[in-house]
Amino acid sequence: MSWAREIQDQIRALRGARIEDASIVEMALIERGPDGLPIFRHRLAPFIQAVCVDLRLADSRVAQIHDYQTDDADFPLGIWFTDTSSDEYSARLLGHPIYRTALPPHIPRGEISDVQLALVDESVLQITLRVGDAAIAIRAGEVIEHSDGYFATVDFSGSTLVFLDAADVDRTKFGEVMSWH
């Protein structure tokens, strides 16, 4: 079995797990906005751009979801189960102004009743989790800054996008250059 298939199976194994808590290390969409400060949220980007998503499960494990680099220089999603959170790693990042702990609203708590994967070849592009009445999507992607207030949201590019409403994935214009203004 390939490593990519093992990752898929591990992600699917979240079905039936219970999320007790969650934390997201958020990365700014834009490093320096018009006021010189990072921009973390914008109406044209209906997601949290994350470095890492930690789901603390009822069985005391932590499911860490984030991207990884393949031999082909793609950045699909992966999952790693540990007994500890990525707090130590996060603490190093949080000292830089373009990172912060994501503010609410946040990933819902409760039992994961369904897990859906969107694949490109064998690589995981997106994970959709149903928790109670909510469907959240976690997608391999990133906001790429262009000059003069323009940006594009792209897939498989070194970050993780968390959509607190999975329907927002369909409203996101991937690959299209847009203006923040």
Image (tube, grey):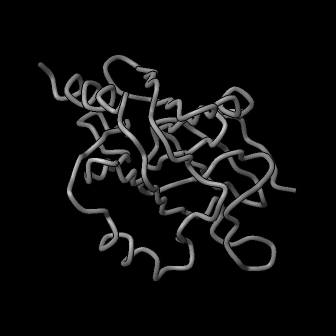
Q: Quadrant of residue 132?
A: top right
At 78% from the left and 46% from the top, the residue drawn is 44
At 19% from the left and 27% from the top, the residue drawn is 6
Name the image quarter holding the C terminus: bottom right
Q: Nearer the viewer, residue 102 or 93?
A: 102
Q: Is residue 131 above or below residue 87?
A: above
Where does residue 72 sit, x and y in percent of width and height?
29, 33
In the rendered structure, the answer to whether residue 128 lies left or right of residue 40 reads left
Q: Is residue 148 above or below residue 120?
A: below
Count of labels in the image = 0
Name the image quarter holding the N terminus: top left
Q: Quadrant of residue 103?
A: bottom right
At 47% from the left and 60% from the top, the residue drawn is 23
At 42% from the left and 46% from the top, the residue drawn is 19
Where does residue 159 sit, x and y in percent of width and height?
46, 50
Q: Is residue 3 above or below residue 64?
A: above
